[in-house]
Image (cartoon, helix red, strand yellow):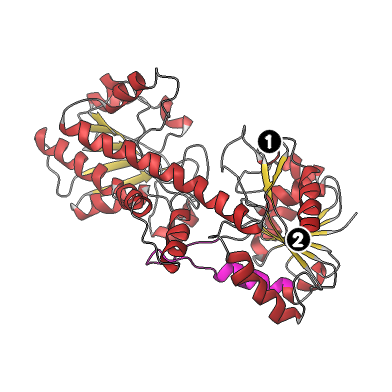
Amino acid sequence: MKTIAVIGLGYVGLPLAVEFGKKRKVIGFEINQGRVDELLSGHDSTLETTDQDLVDAAHLKYTTSIEDIREAQIYIIAVPTPTDKNNRPDLTPLVMASETVGKVLKDGDIVIYESTVYPGATEEDCVPVLEQISNKKMNEHFYVGYSPERINPGDKVHTLTTIKKVTSGSTPEIGKEVDELYNEIITAGTHLAPTIKVAEAAKVIENSQRDINIAFVNELSKIFNLMEIDTLDVLEAAGTKWNFLPFRPGLVGGHCIGVDPFYLAQKAQEVGYHPEIILAGRRLNDSMGAYVATEVVKLMVKAGKPVKNSKALLLGITFKENCPDIRNTRATDVYNELKEFSMEVDVYDPWANHDQVMDEYGINMISEITDFDHYGAVVLAVAHDQFKYLDFKRIKESGAIIYDAKSILPKDLIDARL
């Protein structure tokens, strides 16, 4: 069996390395020595794999040395594909990973990309790097595959092995080999796409579609709020029809939904089309943090509460519930907007790493909630299970405005919700 090298041991790469490592020799490559040390100690801070999973992956070893991956015949690249401050695709991690693999590429090797990109990125942006560094040609000396990741951080039901996998290859034969490779670990089965571009496009529209649907219900929330209609009541009524899509309003962040539409939009503009719906959805979803904060301030003013120099409690800073991932979280938009109103904001999140939040966003979180009496407003931004057991009745009795941005609390305990 061929040896696999997985490049990047984050939310996507580590689960892959672990599952393959249960069956064949795998080398997990990571440039962050701290991450390697953590995994060697038997723990994954992303919580995407359990300590027992790491033990079960008996054929997996970790390294920061390029020389260690030279023995592999299959390279799976699973690195982030972020956007820059202007929301333009940033392929720097992908290019650097391609350069790394290019240095050790041998005749007959297969390089598989998992990172979400726009259609054409693998063959137009990554392959030239591989060819230049290795001095080899695709489909003559080495081959390429693309199998987009579908990891849902924090989801313990829809995990790597239980989500159907899209596969593809630079030749029909390589496509079949890539497909057979993933079938070793994917119990849900695979779908072999006819080309790499089809597989790339399929992935990028998955998250774009979800982004647009959430933008629609977020806009409905704004409209119904002006009409003094409860949005959740409307959605529950509409949801009684069999083909109504059950989307909820909320803050849209994370490394996928809040980023991937910009990749598709960028490529569309390059080929001469200006996408209207995709970018409109992004603008609307990116506005929701400021909207929530403004609604909270309005409620405080209506209740006769002072805003300037008052204190607010923000419950949750991760991008989604029951997950430590803080990448591209939009809860920070609520925080920053409340600060613009000269409010002091405490942030409490039992899932988030305090040091990471400080490093990434400059926010010093509180470690525990000692007293609710001094808060003028409480905003539930993330639906962590722990928050469901807080005494919101006691919070309401303290006089604080309660805004439920996740619509998980009973209506009689809150002042407003999305």
Q: Are marks 1 and 2 in contact (CB under 8 Å)?
A: no
Q: Magenta stretch: give its range.
A: 81-101
Residue 351 in the image, given as x and y percentages of width and height: 50, 42
* Point 67% across, 39% down: residue: 164
Residue tagged 1: 162
The amino acid marked with disc number 2 is: Thr
Viewer can see residue 393: no
Tell me which corner region of the image, top left, top right, bottom left or bottom right, holds residue 64: bottom right
Residue tagged 2: 171
Q: Secondary structure at mark 1?
A: helix
* Point 45% across, 42% down: residue: 210
* Point 39% across, 21% down: residue: 239
Other-residue count near label 2 (Cα within 10 Å), few / some / many at <14 / 14–19 / ≥20: some
Q: Tell me, for residue 191, which label it has, or none.
A: none
Q: Is residue 345 above or below residue 118?
A: above
Q: Is residue 84 magenta?
A: yes
Tell me the quadrant of the picture where the N terminus can be found: bottom right
Q: Is residue 95 magenta?
A: yes
Q: Is residue 191 above or below residue 177?
A: above
Residue 350 in the image, given as x and y percentages of width and height: 47, 40
Q: Secondary structure at mark 2?
A: loop
Other-residue count near label 1 (Cα within 10 Å), few / some / many at <14 / 14–19 / ≥20: few
Q: Give the alpha-carbon distance from disc 1 to disc 2, as whole Å.
A: 27 Å
Residue 88 in the image, given as x and y percentages of width and height: 43, 66
Comes first in the chain, label 1 or label 2: 1
Depth order, front residue of 239/1:
239
The amino acid marked with disc number 1 is: Thr
Q: Is residue 358 above or below residue 184?
A: below
Tell me the quadrant of the picture where the C terminus can be found: top left
Depth order, front residue of 321/72:
72
Position of 259 compared to 121: left or right? left
The mark closer to the camera, 1 or 2, is 2
